[in-house]
Amino acid sequence: MYGSDKVSDEADRTAFRRAEKKYKLYYKQDSKFSKKKKQPKQVDLSDVLDFKSALEDYINKGVLPQGIRVTKCGLDDTQVFYLENHPGFYFIPGALGLEEQCKWIKESLANFPQPPNRTNHNAIYGPISNLFDAAKENMVLVREDNQPDSHDPASGSCISNGEFHSWKFVDEDFAKAKGKTWKTVPASVLLRKLRWSTLGLQFDWSKRNYDISLPHNKIPDALCQLVKRLAAIAMPVGEEFSPEAAIVNYFGLGDTLGGHLDDMERDWSKPIVSMSLGCKAIFLLGGKSREEPPQAMFLRSGDVVLMAGEARECFHGVPRVFTDEENAEIGPLESALSHGSDSSFLEYIKTSRININIRQVF
Ligand code: SIN
């Protein structure tokens, strides 16, 4: 996925790439504005499917946009949309209540990036623990070169160029006192640069497959129960979804997820369950080739997408996340996370989006 983000000139000519460019965040080239006051270019959003308003129109007027159908799932009669021309794709607007959204935002920040789960930072720093707390406390990650004796098993360590490096979070002032002998990275910078973490069976991005030999914890039980319920509508009759792996994607200002396929799981009849948290985004659902023009749709906090069967073979991606106050649409989260220790989660999610996508691998 991240590996396939690179776009060649050739790919630039595809309908999928053109749609990505249409919605991506670009800034106005206006010398009037200083760098700090960069103004985003306006983008025409009239072709973006809005399932929130589709649901309102359906409830109030009984009408649906062309090519869209609705069905009900589960005991609570939740409305589920599907697209006539994309069998296996389901959209459940507002599937997660506010409390549930807050819970998974907190888990995604405080617990999911904890070892043995891997993150994009592993390749450089080895396993690092307590990133979110360290950022909250303005700590810095420091590297002590060539000092294996001082290695603390609770902190990260890695070997590069034959040298042993050990990384750990320390107080900013303590690191300053050490002067230039210690390389430092603020935890807040690492949190901003956190792009993914993996739960359950660990995904190896360099080989683009699951490495079952890597140490891992099971997907948390509460997430399994939730996802089994959500997946039910897209499952082959009589079968229950078995959550074995998850990828958590973290998006900040300007971050995108290039068009890709999720094709490393054995049985594509089982859905990928994809939950959106935080700032509003645009999702592109394409066809089996990048030449097919994709359908753009809004994803809001609490929305859930399922992709099973034929939809598993369709290119998809996220070209835009709206991190500005006007468009992010996170008002309810702001109220729910405004108290006490929750405010650090609010600080993050006000300008970020998290996606948790859960898979059955075998
Ligand atoms: C993915 O396709 O892997 C994630 C999609 C999303 O962020 O909603």
Image (cartoon, grey):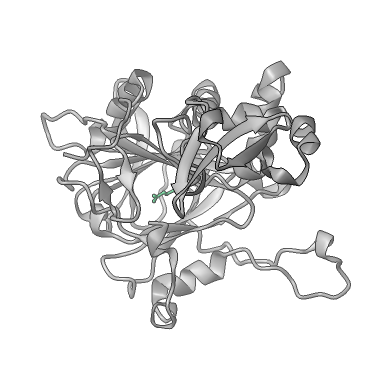
Give the residue drawn at x 47%, y 74%: 18
**In-front residue for pair 49/143:** 143
Give the residue drawn at x 30%, y 58%: 261
**In-front residue for pair 175/210:** 175
Tell whether 110 sits left or right of 212: right
Give the residue drawn at x 42%, y 41%: 62
The location of residue 306, given as percent across then percent down, is: 32, 42
Count of picture labels? 0
The location of residue 80, given as percent across then percent down, is: 35, 38
Q: Is residue 57 visible?
A: no
The location of residue 108, given as percent across then percent down, is: 50, 31
Give the residue drawn at x 60%, y 67%: 44
**In-front residue for pair 11/125:** 125
Instruction: Locate the N terminus and report the quarter of the image it occupies.
Output: bottom left
Say above or below: 18 vs 75.
below
Tell whether 76 sits left or right of 195: left
Q: Is residue 127 visible?
A: yes
Say above or below: 329 vs 154.
below
Say above or below: 96 vs 251.
above
Q: Residue furthest left?
A: 238
Instruction: Locate the C terminus and report the quarter of the image it occupies.
Output: top left
**In-front residue for pair 190/47:** 190
The location of residue 23, given as percent across then percent down, is: 55, 65
